[in-house]
Image (cartoon, rainbow, N blue to C red):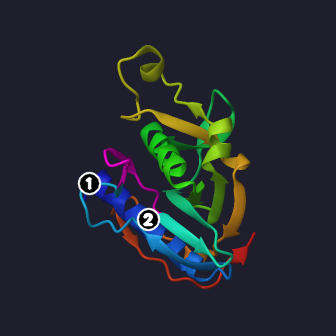
Amino acid sequence: MSKLEANFKHGAAGEALIARYLDGREDVAGYIKHCDGGGDGAPMMSIAGSQQEILPDFEVFRRDGSSYWLELKSYDSAAYNRNRAERVHGIAERQMQSYGEVEKATGRPVWIAVLTLRDGALRWLSLKDILEIAWACECAGCRDGPSCKNKEPLMYCPADRMELIHRFERADLVVVDRAQASARLPILGGGERA
């Protein structure tokens, strides 16, 4: 199995876990999952009939009538940025730009959630707040050209600036065996609210 296929399974398993988490929230009336994993790329939204933008993974509808977009990123753990001496999460710059366009076109806020599998932490922060504290990739390829070491430029957000909203129990977590590059879907057993 390729690294891309393993990452896809990793993300799909995290999305399944978050769907179950949303199912258990009393303030959530329902959601639409846009991350079905069946296509050749991310689901897209036509804006003003011509512009195509990447959709966040979920549209979440609250019982109070409000709604928001939710994009989930699943990582083993937060990466350590030596230059800034802090743990960070990276998100593709082009995705952040697309989510901003979706937010602007729909009038609904976009929230970015990060699930770290090593400690079971589910954190989130609004796109608006992330854009105020995030910074562009500072690798030599981005700084001096011709290309980013990550294959595409990333925006970085300090992990500890994101709000901890839930911590899954160990039994709930997706287990990714890097040597086998296989994943098993989680079975929820409760978890503890943060």
Badge 1 element = loop
Other residues around mark 2 within 10 Å, as few (<14) / some (14–19) / many (≥20): many
Type of amino acid at the residue the image marks with label 1:
Ser
Between 78 and 98, the one lying in front of the other is: 98
64 horizontally vs 116: left or right = right
Instruction: Say which residue appears at 57% left-offset and 73% top-offset.
Output: 61
168 horizontally vs 140: left or right = right
Residue 61 circle label: none
Picture coordinates of residue 80, whole percent (x, y): 61, 40
Q: CA distance from mark 1 to mark 2?
A: 14 Å
Between 32 and 148, the one lying in front of the other is: 32
Q: Earlier in the sequence, mark 1 or mark 2?
A: 1
* Placement of the N terminus among the 4 image quadrants: bottom left
Instruction: Say which residue appears at 32% left-offset and 65% top-offset.
Output: 37
Type of amino acid at the residue the image marks with label 2:
Val
**Direction front: furthest residue:** 48
Picture coordinates of residue 72, whole percent (x, y): 51, 59
Picture coordinates of residue 53, whole percent (x, y): 38, 47
Does residue 169 sit above or below 35 in this rendering?
Answer: below
Does residue 180 sit above or below 21 in this rendering?
Answer: above
The residue labelled by disc 1 is 2
Does residue 82 sit above or below 23 in this rendering?
Answer: above
Q: Which residues are magenta?
A: 45-57
The residue labelled by disc 2 is 176
